[in-house]
Amino acid sequence: MHILLVAGAFNSLTQRVHAELTARGHDVAVETVADGEAIRTAVRRHRPGLVLAPMLRAAIPREVFTAHTCLVVHPGPPGDRGPSSLDWAVAGGARRWGVTVLEAEAEMDAGRVWAWAPCPLPERGKSDLYRGEIADAALTAVHLAVERFASGAHTPSRQDDPALGAEVCVRPAMRQADRRLDWHRHTTADVLRILRAADSQPGVRDTLLGAEWFLHGGHPEYRLRGRPGTLLAVRAGAVCRATADGAVWLPVLRERRTDGRRGIALPAVTALGDRLPDLPEEPVPLNPEAAPGPGAHGGPDARTAWSDIRYREQGATGFLEFSFPGGAMSTAHCRRLLDAYRYACTRPTRVLVLGPARDFFSNGIHLGVIEAAADPAAESWSNIEAMNDLVRAVLTTTDRLTVAALGGNAAAGGVMLALAADEVWCRRGVVLNPHYRLMGLPGSEYWTATLPRRVGPHTARDLTERALPVGADSAHRIGLVDRVLETSPQGFATETAARAARTVGSAETERRIGAKKSDLEAREARRPLADHRAEELAAMRAVFDDPGAPYHALRAAFVRKEAPPAGAPQPRFAARP
């Protein structure tokens, strides 16, 4: 079937829908649209058999939905209506939710239901849920809706159909007034719930140190206490702020600007800059112990000191877990993770698993920190050098088997970090973007060594030049990943640990570890890693140091969520047969 995806942005869900429908043999076109006229133009251009809107801010015009079947993905169960569905669910502490695929009509979210799928809502940030449980339910519903449409025999249900068991609930857009924090009255649990419902968009507007900010994300603190609203400490770029009954760590702040431009989301310490008072620096616990004191805000196993990098062991397997907001890795992130990796390599393990328990693996260098730097070209260089140092450490590890475990999406240098490991495991539902072209960069992180070795030179060239997302099944088919794990986002860490335990006990694993040193020496003899690095970084340096290079304008637009400049590189979708 020829399907047209219309979306406000080529975001994670739209990418996954495109990747999975394409893998199922459909001819899928994508148009990013800002208004009804753009939708009309896209439909006239493509003449699709079906119009599907995975993420759409604009209303589909009447003349379009009366002439074509137009299906809209709504992140709520049947009967739920409104533009802030998931925000209200997270803020209200809902534990079960769903995603509905409904037919577009004049009244927003009121169309007939073609399919829906339920899902759990664990205590996670909205954006994490959107890429995880919500996306899983969305794809289940999308595939069912497309199958039903293709059959020509299905009659969609009205939302008040008793068979759906739904009650219509129309909720307004959630405003900043609905998200307001009262640090003297709100408990840590209250603050976390409000923060999670706004992560990563739009953030929670608040006042701190005489300025207005949007707060993005939060983590509980169980030991530190202070006068509500005051800052208590810093750790790993985050600031700790006292609540009515405890404290929370705030990892990311975005300045509220008055000139109409969007501020840049930055590590809190970086964002506050000279405003930040002299605060004690809490150590980053690589092996956090259970915290003393009453009350747990994140579940029975969450009473540990927050850290964005953790290391633990289970038998002969080491687990180096890292979780950076948005998957972006600044120079400081890369250096701290490299130190942790070196520590992990001193431990007597046979398998070392790298990656977060869920959500983003990595999206490469931190474009926000680079854009906010006094010298973006110099910071770009520092960041890419630090990323290369980390990747090289993984590539040259010869005394144990390394596994990159991707419970969530990865892009650009983050994909290449994963490919540095001996094996790549990913959850079904993960989307990979193994390319740099859309940011105007030639690429680095030893990609010229690892990507062709895994998928072959022709496929490597196709992946980097077409710049299209790759779903988990397609990535496995072409050799980009080694295993696809059938598990929920919440179950990924458990499934990974179980598979790692089986890998440790394998004779094949010991054989592979024994051969790693000679294999690396053979590759170095053919072409040293240093040559790949020098060639890649020379091309990157030329871009960084050229003020007129598209990278600088593309970066600025990306971090401020502005429209890309005219002539910006676009994904190269296949031409319609």
Image (cartoon, rainbow, N blue to C red):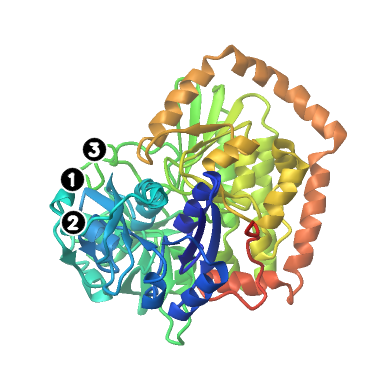
Splitting the image into 4 quarters, where does residue 84 fall? Answer: bottom left
Residue carrying label 2: 245
Closer to the camera, 417 or 231? 417
> How far apart are the two marked residues, 3 and 1, measured between alpha carbons?
10 Å
Point out the tag, 1 or 2, that comes first from the N-terminus.
2
Splitting the image into 4 quarters, where does residue 302 fall? Answer: top left
Q: Residue pushed farthest right? A: 526
Instruction: Classify mark 2: residues with Cα within 10 Å, few (<14), some (14-19) or many (20+).
Output: some
Q: Amino acid at mark 1?
A: Gly
Q: Position of residue 345 (x, y in %)?
A: 59, 30
Q: Amino acid at mark 3?
A: Pro
Q: Position of residue 10 (x, y in %)?
A: 51, 63
Closer to the camera, 148 or 464? 148
Residue carrying label 3: 300
Point out the tag, 3 or 2, that comes first from the N-terminus.
2
Q: Position of residue 72 (x, y in %)?
A: 36, 62
Point out the tag, 3 or 1, that comes first from the N-terminus.
1
Residue 262 vertical position relative to residue 148 in the rendered view, above or below: below
* Count of picture labels: 3
Residue carrying label 1: 295
Q: Dot 3 lies on which element? A: loop
Residue 314 vertical position relative to residue 326 in the rendered view, above or below: above
Q: Is residue 88 left or right of residue 72?
A: left
Q: Dot 2 lies on which element? A: loop
Q: Is residue 365 left or right of residue 15?
A: right
